[in-house]
Image (cartoon, rainbow, N blue to C red):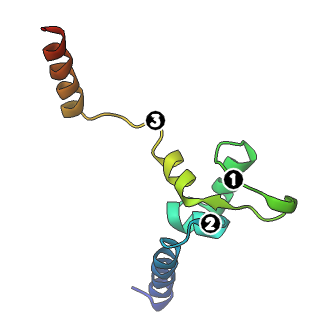
Amino acid sequence: MESHELLQKLNRLESLIIGTSKQILNVDDVVNYTGFSKSYVYKLVHKNILPYSKPNNRTLFFTKKEIDEWLLQNKSKSISQIEQEAINYTNSTKK
């Protein structure tokens, strides 16, 4: 691995470690946290898909909690979860 690639990976790790303790994120933090490209984050903001704040019409800010919630929306259940729900439903209707 080239030293340039190694430096990039170390910088990303450092950003992730520092970013995990932050509750308010900027665009660069969101890029590091999610792995999305900066242009994709701006696209999501432009389309009002990603929740954000923009005080004084300048810098974009995001809350880590809202980013986490957004990332986990539209969750798909596993087969075992669906089977367990079916069993629970069947058992509750037998009474």
Residue 11: where, in percent of width, then height? 51, 83
Q: Residue 89: image x %, image y %? A: 21, 17
Residue 90 falls in image quadrant = top left
Identify the image quadrant of the C terminus.
top left
Return the residue nearer the eye: 40 or 23: 23
**Dot 3, crowdedness within 10 Å: few (<14), some or many (≥20)?**
few
Picture coordinates of residue 48 (x, y %)?
71, 43
Q: What amino acid type is highlighted by mark number 2?
A: Leu
Q: Which one is nearer the viewer's eye here, 36 or 62? A: 62
Name the kind of residue labelled 1 in the image.
Tyr
**SS state under label 3:** loop
The answer to which quarter of the image holds residue 54 is bottom right
Q: Which residue is mark 1?
A: 52
The residue singled out by tag 3 in the image is 74
Going from N to C along the chain, the mark reached first, 1 or 2, is: 2
Residue 25, label in figure? 2
- Is residue 74 left or right of 30 when viewed as pictured? left
Mark positioned earlier in the residue sequence (1 or 3): 1
- Find the distance from the CA under tag 3 to the CA under tag 2: 23 Å
Instruction: Name the outermost residue toward the right.
Output: 56
Give the residue drawn at x 59%, y 63%.
Answer: 30
Identify the element where label 1 is drawn.
loop
Query: Label 3 sits on what residue type?
Result: Asn
Marks 1/2: CA distance? 10 Å
Query: Badge 1, how many Cα within 10 Å: few under 14, some, many 20+?
Result: some
